[in-house]
Amino acid sequence: MITCSSASSELDEPLAATAATAATWLLLEQPGPWGAKALTGSHLDTELGRALDAACAGTGVRPALIRRPGRHADNLPLAGHQVVLAHTRPGHSWVRRTELTDPAELLTLDLAAAGAGEHGGFGVPHTGGPLALVCTNGRRDRCCALLGRPLAAELAAAGHSEVWEVTHLGGHRFAPTMLVLPYGYAYGRLGEAAAKEVLAATAAGHTVPQWSRGRSCWDRPGQAAEQAVRELTGDTAADALTVSQRALAEDRWECRVEHADGRAWRVEVVQRTSAPARPESCGKTPGTPSRMEVRGVQPLDGPYRG
C-alpha cells in the first residue's frame, strides 16, 4: 500500500524547514477519540474548541489537544484537564503547566502576551525533563496513527521522558512526527532508536539535525537557514542560534543567523516547488508542495548591513 509517508520517503523528500510555525504552544488534555479537526471534533465542548481556535488566531499561539498514550476509551472520566503552555524562542523558552476543571478558563488567558513570550504567571514551571508530543491523529491522516501510536507507546514504556499523543503537528507525510519541548524542535521519520536519541539530546540541551524539521518559532525560511548553519558548523546546542529574516521577493528571503559566541552568517533561501507530485496526506490528490532551498551561506565578519 502506498501511503503519503512511504511516498515521501521513497522520494527522499527533505525534512528541513517543514515544521509547523508557532512561537508558543497551548496543549489541552482531552482523552477519547479525536476528529480531523480535533478542537471541534472531540469530547471537548464544540463551542469552546471553536472559541479557543479563534482566540489563538494571529497571536503566535498554536492550540492542540493531547492525551496519554494507549487505548482511548470513549467514556473515560476526567476530573481535571492537564494544560501545558510553552514558549520556544531561543534563550527565552519556558514550559508552564496546570490542571483545570473547566478548560473554558483558557479563554481568559492573554494569548497575545503568551505568543510574545510572557506567561503572566500561568500555572507553575515544568521542572521535569523534555516533553515529547507524538502526532497520532488517524482521523487526520492514517500514517499518524499507524506509525505514531506505536512510537508514543514505546517511548512512554521506556520512561525516558514525559510522552503525550497530540492532535496535529503538520507534515503527515513525515510520520511519525514528534515535537519536543522546551525548545520546540519538530522531528520526522523517527524510529524508536532515533526518537530516544532526540529525547536524550534534548535533555542535554541539544538538537539532532539529522531528523529535524525545524524549530517551530521560526518561519520556514528561518528554519531552512538555521539548518544550513548547523550542517555547516556541526553545532547542535539548541539555543546557540537565533534567526532573523527579510523578504527580497515573494519567494526569496535573506536570513541572518547569529551564534551566541558572536559569529553570524547571511543565508539566502528560495521557495521551490517539489516534483514529481506526491500525496501530501493519505487519500488526497497528489500535489507539489513548496520546499525551502538554501542558495548560499556567507559568514559575516563585520557589522551586518542587510
Image (cartoon, helix red, strand yellow):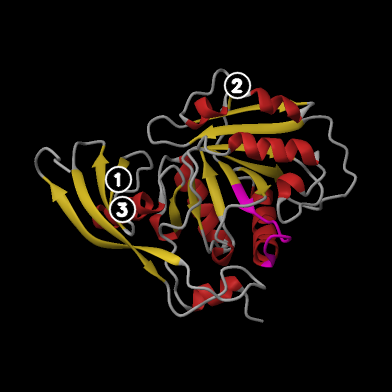
Badge 3 vs badge 2, beta-carbon distance below 8 Å: no
The quarter holding residue 228 reads bottom left
Residue receiving disc 1? 245
Left or right, 112 with respect to 39, comes to: left
Circle nearer the N terminus (2, 1): 2
Mark 2: give few (<14), some (14-19) or many (20+) Cα within 10 Å: some
Residue 288 — which label? Answer: none
- Between the residue at mark 2 and the residue at mark 1, the CA separation in whole angstroms equals 31 Å
User: Is residue 111 part of the magenta span, yes or no?
Assistant: no
- Image coordinates of residue 170 in percent, x first then y, are 56, 56
Give whichever of 129, 28 is nearer the camera: 28
Circle nearer the N terminus (3, 2): 2
User: Disc 1 on helix, strand or loop?
Assistant: strand
- Image coordinates of residue 165 in percent, x first then y, are 68, 49
Residue at the far right: name it: 75
- Image coordinates of residue 161 in percent, x first then y, are 59, 43
User: Disc 2 on helix, strand or loop?
Assistant: loop
- Between the residue at mark 3 and the residue at mark 2, the CA separation in whole angstroms equals 33 Å
Residue at the far top: name it: 121
Residue receiving disc 3? 225
Badge 2 vs badge 1, beta-carbon distance below 8 Å: no
Left or right, 271 with respect to 40, comes to: left
Which residues are drawn in magenta?
133-142
Circle nearer the N terminus (3, 1): 3
Amino acid type at image mark 1:
Gln
User: Is residue 141 part of the magenta span, yes or no?
Assistant: yes
- Between the residue at mark 3 and the residue at mark 1, the CA separation in whole angstroms equals 9 Å
Report if residue 68 is visible in the image. no
Mark 1: give few (<14), some (14-19) or many (20+) Cα within 10 Å: many
Left or right, 5 with respect to 83, comes to: left
Residue receiving disc 2? 122
Position of 288 relative to 77 (above/below) = below
